[in-house]
């Protein structure tokens, strides 16, 4: 039986596809009255699950620039995108004819400065501003949940460095 397990494992490895890379934007803003941060979620066009804007790398663009472009195309938001990634997550992307490929999604922060009335995918997705906790609860990918919550903690730490020091 051990040899059979080894053969099955070897065959699986032979047909394994390489991990594909995508670029994503974790879009956020601060509420005007309370300065509490919130994040933007959109639905995927195929399954309707809650996700953040993401897509394939683009020729001639760095990954953070591609993420910024995806945020514009999918959610109609513009702003300032950080060039340093805040993390990554893995998921299986469903392709045509039922094929699934594993994707590593590089995530970049995008502080939203403007929401446009007209953009390429307007009307094909739902969008909602939610707390980071609510965003983490809605997304399906465990690594993305963790990334959302850790980014919120980093944001809050930079907002109140004086209060944090005084409390210690």
Image: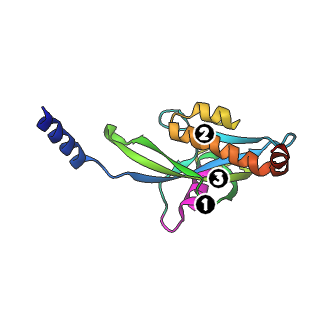
In primary-sequence order, the first of circles 1 and 3 is 1
Q: Is residue 41 visible?
A: yes
Image position, residue 143 (x, y; %):
52, 41
Of residues 42 and 146, the one drawn nearer to the viewer in this rendering: 146
Most distant residue in the front direction:
168
Image position, residue 146 (x, y; %):
57, 40
Res 52 → quadrant? top right
Of residues 7 and 39, the one drawn nearer to the viewer in this rendering: 7
Say if the magenta span includes residue 100. no
The circle drawn on residue 109 is 3
In primary-sequence order, the first of circles 2 and 1 is 2
Q: What's the magenta region?
A: 59-73
How many neighbours does mark 1 have within 10 angstroms: few (below 14), some (14-19), or many (20 or more)?
few
Residue on which the image places disc 2: 42
The circle drawn on residue 84 is 1
Image quadrant where one finds the N terminus: top left
């Amino acid at each position: 039986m051990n040899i059979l397990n080894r053969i099955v494992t070897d065959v699986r490895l032979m047909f394994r596809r390489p991990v594909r890379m995508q670029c994503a934007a974790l879009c956020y803003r601060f509420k005007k009255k309370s300065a509490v941060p919130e994040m933007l979620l959109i639905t995927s066009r195929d399954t309707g699950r809650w996700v953040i804007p993401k897509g394939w790398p683009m020729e001639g663009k760095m990954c953070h620039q591609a993420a910024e472009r995806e945020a514009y195309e999918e959610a109609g938001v513009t702003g300032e995108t950080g060039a340093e990634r805040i993390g990554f997550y893995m998921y299986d992307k469903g392709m045509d004819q039922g094929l699934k490929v594993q994707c590593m999604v590089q995530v970049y922060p995008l502080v939203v400065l403007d929401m446009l009335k007209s953009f390429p995918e307007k009307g094909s997705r739902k969008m909602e501003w939610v707390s980071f906790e609510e965003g983490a609860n809605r997304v399906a990918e465990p690594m993305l949940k963790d990334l959302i919550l850790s980014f919120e903690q980093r944001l809050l730490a930079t907002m109140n460095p004086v209060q944090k020091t005084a409390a210690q």
